[in-house]
Image (spheres, helix red, strand yellow):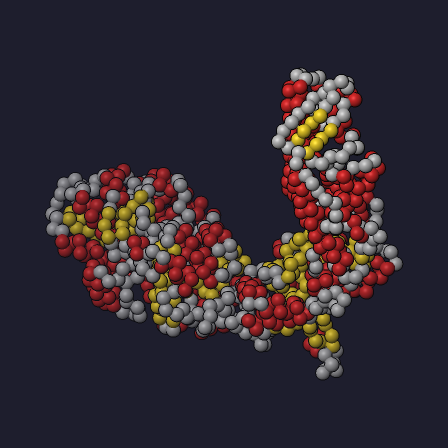
Amino acid sequence: MNRFFFLVLIIASELVFVSPGVESASTNVNIEEVTKIGAIVDANSQMGKQAITAMKIAVQNFNSDSRNHKLSLQIRDHNRDPFQAAMAAQELINNEKVKVIAGMETWEETAVVAEIASRVQVPILSFAAPAVTPLSMSRRWPYLIRMASNDSEQMKCIADLAQKYKWRRVAAIYEDNVYGGDSGKLALLSEALQNVSSSEIESRLVLPPISSISDPKEAVRGELKKVQDKQSRVFIVLQASLDMTINLFTEANRMGLVGKDSVWIVTNTVANALDSLNTTVISSMEGTLGIKSYYSDDSSPYKEFSALFRRNFTSEYPEEDHFHPSIHALRAHDSIKIITEAIGRLNYNISSPEMLLRQMLSSDFSGLSGKIRFKDGELLNADTLRIVNVVGKKYKELDFWLPNFGFSKTSSKHNVGDISSNIAAEGFTGPVIWPGNLINRNPKGWAMPSNQEPMRIGVPTKTFFEKFVVIKDDPLNGNSNDKNLRYDGFSIELFRLVVDHLNYDLPYEFVPHDGVYDDLIRGVYNKTYDAAVGDLTILGNRTEYVEFTQPYAESGFSMIVPAKQEESTWMFTKPFTWEMWMVTAASFIYTMFIVWFLEHQSNPEFRGTLKDQISNTFWFAFSTLFFSHRANIQSNLTRVVVVLWLFVVFILTSSYTASLSSLLTVRRLEPNVTDIQSLKSCNLKVGCVDDSFVKKYLEEVLGFRSGNIVSFGNIEANYIQKFENNTIDSLFLERPYEKVFLDKYCKKYTAINTYRFGGLGFAFQRGSPIALDISRAILDLSEDGRLKTLEEEWFKPSSECSADERYSTRPENLTLHSFWGLYIVYGATSIFCFLLFVIRLLNNSWSHQETYQGNIAAWNISARLARYIHNRKGTINNPARVSALDLAPPALELSSSRWEYKLSPTHPPENLQVELQMHE
């Protein structure tokens, strides 16, 4: 950074001596007028040599076509040093009086040259662009034109690759620039990975500038050693010179980092120079994916230029092996064309640098490197990227990556369609050759286990129930070391089944872990183990340290309490709730009254003394409950009421019989404690396993006092012992263990109040692709039924706790709500019959009153109605009529076709006697 400030001071001092007349050229158009153009490139690199050749060809083409104006190309070598690039720019401006400067392959070189040129108003055409374009760039360097796009699209392409192949951890490698930075590419890559693929940069390898070290191989080796003990094997080379790239891949091959399941990706700073690498160097990069800036090589202008370029390049640089033009050569050629077209539009009058800059920015043509059109000093169209794969001593082109579209099999955005999604699902066109000659599958980007170094899997020795994990000495081997132990149990068998389901070999070995579960999780985190297998509960705080698989069993915990089978002397009352019993009794009494009211005057079976009437009516109603009534019903209205009542009785007795049968045949347990609140209010003791998250949950979430929590070792016998000696009143167990416990002790205990958690799963190191493959295999086993079969094999209930009995549905009491409609229909119909009877009674009374006596007091009608209800004597041959006539006025004699009434007018109304004679 000190060198940069020193450079700025030099620039400021030199600007004092710059004559304003340098900006102007002669306005007279001479036949031999010459415009000087400066070029600052790395003349010793193949990239710089190609740029020089391409610019010379463009200048020669212009000079041969123009008779009145010529171009003179002034080339300066910056020797990969921004300081020398700045000095070269000053020399070209002050001494050579150049009108435009082109070149600068790196942004560090471009920045210092743009600072100088903007002060003296000399347009700059740069072959490089910053990783991130600042908003103030066009104001800070108004005379800077960038022939390349920034790196944001390139980083998005890398992120799409990581998402496509599910690489969760990557290592970023870059060669430090002269100012001690990564040019902002690292931040762009990190953001793109998080936005697109949820991946992250695990390691950063910073290589010193190759010009500042004497032994680059040792420097590279020292950085690569930092990732040897890490699991991630996805290496992304963000920026590096060709010499540093050669040393990087040479040492990586020697250290075994370019092998199976490893991934190497190089950005365009390296990929664009693949054509210039010799066969020995490129063979060390076999399997590498490169991201190149795409250009069309099948157009006529390109073919003409390519032929001329090869001839000139091999003639001028015979020592170079590769002579095909790269993207740098095409951009160099297009930069000269931008200048010549701008000069032509100005009629060769370039006295105004501002007018020249404006004409250059208004360029709009299809160049050899692509579409040339600018906005705010930058190419308007982002580069189309080409994915290449290094194979043997050359590379092959795969597919394209288009900005805002993603992967595509074509370079045109108009023909993309669903191709992008097809590539994401099916892969690139043609097979991809990966490092280590990996075939039949894509690399995991992870240090995969081998037979020599199998995966170390920690297994808990202290499990809650042996049905999940069992570790015993192998009887076939007398040695008692860790490698001769026998591992069994549901979790172990499931893991073996899952590994067999994978489409690749996964060598592993079990290692017993004699400690608590949280320590086992930390062992995976600190790389003591590669994974952990067992009954591991998925918790939020644990996911911060490890990567869990898909749950293979539901989790949570339940409260286990002692229980006894429900037995009661009053069991026969259980089918109905007390509200139901009350309404049924009220309906019974109501039916007695309705039947008596409608029948007691007309039916001799319901007459007699008050005691006889009550007993007869009660017996009739009671006999209807068993459909054994014998009384003769004479009124049609009574028949309607009785029929509906019998229907109600039929429904009630059928439901009662069914419910009582269920209560007597289905086992029901009544817990001693019904909820957690009663435990806390009564200060009862609760138990849990000491090696469990449950204790912390009971204290912090459910609010139990620590003194009321009894923790003990995770041995099955401890649970029963604590209950039998009344040490605890309830036990909190995780759901899978609760199922095993109740399958064995269902006669004495029951579970209530279940709390849900993440489930049981296997733990792997964060970012491990194996965890994703294991999760997918667990889902496959669950879908095809093999997981269910394994559960049934390991978790068979005891003979006295069969599945049907263990999980039988508990019968519920019948409530009034279930029969409310039935009661409403019956009540409404019986009331209707009652009212109809009363209306007929009153109607006949009013009719006889008007005929014989006129109006009568209301109290007299009420008195006669009460007299009808209370009357218990007399012989009545037709009850249908007598009921009405009993209310008729006295001293009258009525005749009809069926009845004859003889009434004595001499008797007072209160001594009225009625005689009824039926006509034959």
Locate residue 97, reporting x and y percent. 25, 46
Which quadrant holds the C terminus?
top right
Residue nearest the viewer, comparing 798 with 654: 654
Q: Is residue 318 above or below residue 121?
A: below
Judge whether residue 533 can be spotted in this image: yes
546 vs 324, left or right, is right
Q: Residue at 77%, 57% (x, y): give it.
A: 664
Q: Quadrant of residue 850?
A: top right
Q: Residue furthest front?
A: 920
Locate residue 208, reporting x and y percent. 48, 59
Locate residue 142, reporting x and y percent. 33, 41
Q: Residue furthest right?
A: 725
Q: Residue at 67%, 47% (x, y): give it.
A: 647
Q: Residue at 21%, 45% (x, y): give it.
A: 342
Judge whether residue 12 can be spotted in this image: no
Q: Quadrant of residue 231?
A: bottom right
676 vs 334, left or right, is right
Q: Is residue 83 above or below residue 873?
A: below
Q: Is residue 831 above or below residue 567?
A: above
479 vs 313, left or right, is right
Residue nearest the viewer, comparing 774 with 76: 774
Q: Residue at 54%, 74% (x, y): give it.
A: 505
Residue nearest the viewer, comparing 745 with 84: 745
